[in-house]
Amino acid sequence: MTTGALSGLRVLDLGHYLAGPMLAMFLGDNGADVIHIDPPDGPRWDSPANAALYRNKRQLHLDLHDPAAVARAAALAESADVVVDNFRPGVLKRLGLDPAAIRERAPQLVWCSLPGFPRDDPRAELPGWDGLLAAATGLYPARHGEVDGDPVFSALPMASTFAAFMASHRVAGALLTRASTGRGAWIEVSLYEAAFQAVGSYAEVPVSRKTDNPIYARLHRMLQTARAADGTHLYFDTPLRGLQRFLDRFLPQYRLVDLDDSTCEQMVRDLVELIGTRSGRDWERICQEELQGAFGLCQSTRAWLADDHARASRSVIEVADPVLGATVQPGFPVLLSESRPQLCRGRSARPDGAGPEADIDWIGEGFSWSSDRRLRHDLALDGVRVLDCASLLAGPTSTRVLAQYGADVLKVDSPAVTASRADPLTDDRSAFNGHRTVSSGKRMAFLDLKDERIQGLLPDLIGAMDIVHHNFTPAAAERLGLGAERVRELNPAAIYSTMSLHSHGGSRADYRGHEPLAQMVTGMGVRAGGEGPPRMLGVVVNDHAAGHLNAFGIMLALLDRLRTGAGQQVNASLSRTATLHQLPFAIGYDGRSWDEPSGPEATGRHALDRLYRARDGWFYLAAGSDGRDLLAQVDGLEDSVAVPDGQLGAWLVPRFAARSVAEAVAELRAAGIGAHRYVPVIDLVEDPIALRRGLLAVVDHPGIGRAFGIGHPVFGAFEDSARPFLTARRPGLDTVDVLEELGAGRLLDDLIGSGAVAVGENPVVNVTDTPGYWSSGSIESYTTPARLARTIEVIRSGQPRRIRRAP
């Protein structure tokens, strides 16, 4: 038996393709006993990805059209702790595997379903292909930060991976609840719902705060990457103080704060010429290790699989596969220091059992966690206290997820980020970007952790916490009194959680940087750039996703603490998350063709799985193996059967261009082919399903005002119509209360006067009295006033969501 956090847990994996099997893979990596069921002729998706998706699992082949096989599957489900499926809604019931009936017989069971569209969505019968889901949720923006305009295809299966990431903590949360109540849960995480987590803060109207750093804006217009001597590229990230140190050493005539456009252009030319004198990896080492600058190597996914840090940190792992031979593949979703994830077995060479009489049964002893906590509304983390010292997007997302399960989260920020003290060479002016998206559900305090008086309060603060979370480098955490050893001394039972650019272990463990560097080093940027230089994806794909995986790891550590009483360290990273996002393209083996669609000109995977331009917009077409026959049933496309595969896309382009989007989508769906209009993010407000389900919501935020963005429902025992949503509080709004709780209220005036604390009057986010908040002429957003009109109408006239106030 394994010793992972989920050791003994029984998981029945009915998943296929990517989302369901990936979730079950995460559970198996952490010690669960997983039995995966496939049809008699093997997996429905014949892909190298199965070398990873089938690890740490045993395989059983059953024909679910056979009543005896259905009975065997039902018996396994009733004796399991968790069942995972990603069939379309209603399919399992038609096969005789009714989840509701099985859960009635086994009320302790946690059943997690990951369909393409939700069961109450009129699109539920559409195939849950990633291209369709990306089209439905605006995940193909042409450039980073765009919410409007024509789409640019990305081969990343973002809806599937986000669904697996979200479902991982939904299952862990249900297990924590079961430990207290004895009851299981029905969980649905549709790919459609999950895709809104990728949209993230780009749905905000108005934006919480728009980056206001003219130095970076000027530089970013002129320079993002530079070609190195070995043909790789180097990406320049923030904070800019690292770039200034680089200039001080190599080009001392330039000071960033003094640049005008002309001088900046000359500096960029000199910088590009200089980068061309050494390899990209050499420059990355110099900039990160000697100058503490946020520079990053741009390399292919193939190179990342061979990268020394990727292997040393187990962001990628070596696995022997009976089909492909020796493979290198994405590693574990998150690192735990004590109940460590591990590889126990690779994919089986043949099924471990076949048919209803197969001799295969559970090895795991079953659910063995118990807790005497009494939970309000079955909130998994009710009463759990969290200290969140993380900044920007990824780190705060982790604890916002915890707040959705009822955790009491205290978010501590430095008073230095207030507008009057912001340093243009730091990330101060980016602080609170996406605040309503990533910090809903938290109490907010400004405390300067460098101040001796605040340092004196830390022991009591840390001692009262169940979880301490930050995204500092290890050295910075030590200086601030938040190092791992000190926290362990003060509170041995605390979970010590960190978010980092790169995972612990390996040469890049202490490197600085943000989303762009994770995309670049793992191959995302090279794929997005194609034949041109590496480029950013249009979606912040790693920041939000890493937060979900971090929350999963924290919940695993809490489950393990129920058994041991001890805390441990949890680490999630952006580059580890980026590797998992690319799983279909990140299986390295001898003879692999590295030919996935790439570059901004790519429109899809092939003629029957791609974007097409219609007369009045774009749509996505997704058809399976019978797509050619079905296509010939569409009026005007009867002759498509005679067109060679390699020419079909070009043949279809003018024919679809003559139709409207509505006509093309309706005709294709009538023929049994999946199709969906491409909906830019700014137009998602027109989707009644998104509004009804709270995937997009109008919320009244304390100290901020009414605003629009993705919704954050509370994951407890509520009727959908009465489910509360989290709100974001104005930064600093709870500083005074926190000081009073720590017995330091008498110091308030002195602390404010010296700048050691700040309160909620600081103008670091947009609020209702910010000039232009209600004016479509000057409202802070990512698009034009005319395109905002419908969203502003919804904000003004819509019924705000019922809210749950911060504990």
Image (cartoon, grey):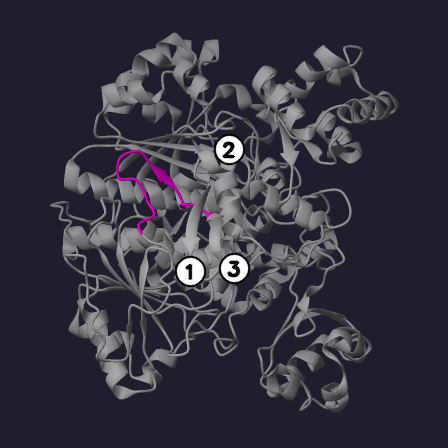
Is 707 situated above or below 312?
A: below
Residue denoted by label 2: 309
Tag 3: amino acid: Ala
Q: Residue at x 40, y 76 (%)?
A: 89
Tag 2: amino acid: His
Q: Nearer the viewer, mark 2 or mark 1?
A: 1
The secondary structure type at the circle numbered 3 is: helix
Query: Quick check: 766 left or right of 490?
Result: right
Give me the C-alpha separation between circle 1 and circle 3.
29 Å
Q: Residue at x 19, y 63 (%)?
A: 362
Question: 106 or 726: nearer the eye?
Answer: 106
Question: 161 or 371: nearer the eye?
Answer: 161
Residue denoted by label 3: 159
Q: Residue at x 88, y 23 (%)?
A: 262
Asked if the residue under mark 3 is in contact with the one under mark 1, i.e. CB atoms within 8 Å, the reply is no
Span shown in magenta = 330-344
Residue denoted by label 1: 322
Quadrant of the rendering where the C terminus is positioned: top left
176 magenta-colored: no
Is 20 situated above or below 214?
A: below
* Mark closer to the chain start, 3 or 2: 3
